[in-house]
Image (spheres, helix red, strand yellow):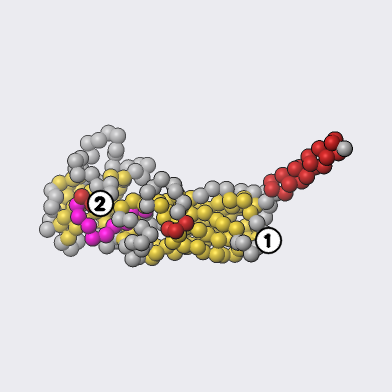
Amino acid sequence: MKKRIAICTAFILVLLTSRVNAQAVLSVAQISYPDTTSFYSIDNYFLRLVNTGSQNFSGTVLIHAVVDTTNTGALNQNNTVAVAPDSFTIAANSSDTFTIQIPIQPNYFKQGINTVIIWPVNDPQSTNLFIVQDTLELQVNVIGSIGVNEIEGYDKKNTLFFPNPFQDYMYIRNQDPKFVIERVRVWDMYGQLVKDLPFNGTLNMSGLAQGTYVIEFLNHSNQLRRYKAIKE
């Protein structure tokens, strides 16, 4: 009797394992999103739903997006900014594109660097279930009307440009061999990108209005250093 029970148990485990292995396995991948934004904007996140499983999937998927202001990977469901249900038909080892909108509200985001965590969730009313493979984590910098020392990532010791304040032109030093500048981006304090240029040592700011700007220097790995500059 014990041997029969053991054989039946083994058969059930094999059957369950084969069913699990045959399920669709879904995850979310990044296409593009605004990595710098401002409060009260509504941002479009262009994403891809990927099925790495051995079975086709057709059904409803809930796309959850949660903001982690601590940047530790913590999933605080109270900070959910989007739940976007959508219907997908994705073959095994294939993918489909979709877009979600995320409102940049101060009750969800902090000023500075935040992590947006996005992952697919099974529809509780659906019988066509899938396995969630992983979460997608995207960093976004939220800019508001703030002062020089309140920008997260602001480097006030190792200034790479002069003069500051400036009038029409800024001159950029690139003396750190560990951080070779390839691009320069300029944002106004409303989170609008006003310049995105390859690095050449000089930045023409003559067309910009007086005010405060965030200057970002990017290297070949898209690592960045961020500064505040004032146009007089």
- Location of the N terminus by quadrant is top right
Q: Establish if 212 lies above or below 22.
A: below
Residue 22's x, y, as percent?
A: 70, 49
Query: Is residue 68 shown left or right of residue 146?
Result: right
**Residue picked out by circle 2:** 151
User: Residue type at mark 2?
Assistant: Ile
Query: Is residue 133 shown left or right of residue 102?
Result: right
Label of residue 127 in the image: 1
Residue 2's x, y, as percent?
A: 84, 36
Q: Residue at x 65, y 63 (%)?
A: 126
Query: Residue 221: which quarter of the image?
Result: top left
Magenta residues (range): 139-148
Q: Residue at x 41, y 45 (%)?
A: 72
Q: Residue at x 75, y 43 (%)?
A: 13
Q: Residue at x 56, y 65 (%)?
A: 86
Q: Does residue 111 show up?
A: yes
Label of residue 232 in the image: none
Residue 78's x, y, as percent?
A: 44, 58
- Location of the C terminus by quadrant is bottom left
Cβ atoms at labels 2 and 1 below 8 Å apart: no
Q: Secondary structure at mark 1?
A: loop
Neighbour tally class for label 1: few under 14, some 14-19, many 20 plus, Cα within 10 Å: few
Query: Is residue 13 shown left or right of residue 74?
Result: right
Q: Does the segment drawn in magenta span residue 132?
A: no
Label whose residue precedes the other's in the sequence (2 or 1): 1
User: Residue type at mark 1?
Assistant: Thr
Query: Is residue 18 shown left or right of residue 102?
Result: right
Q: Establish if 41 lies above or below 139.
A: below
Q: Secondary structure at mark 2?
A: loop
Residue 200's x, y, as percent?
A: 24, 46
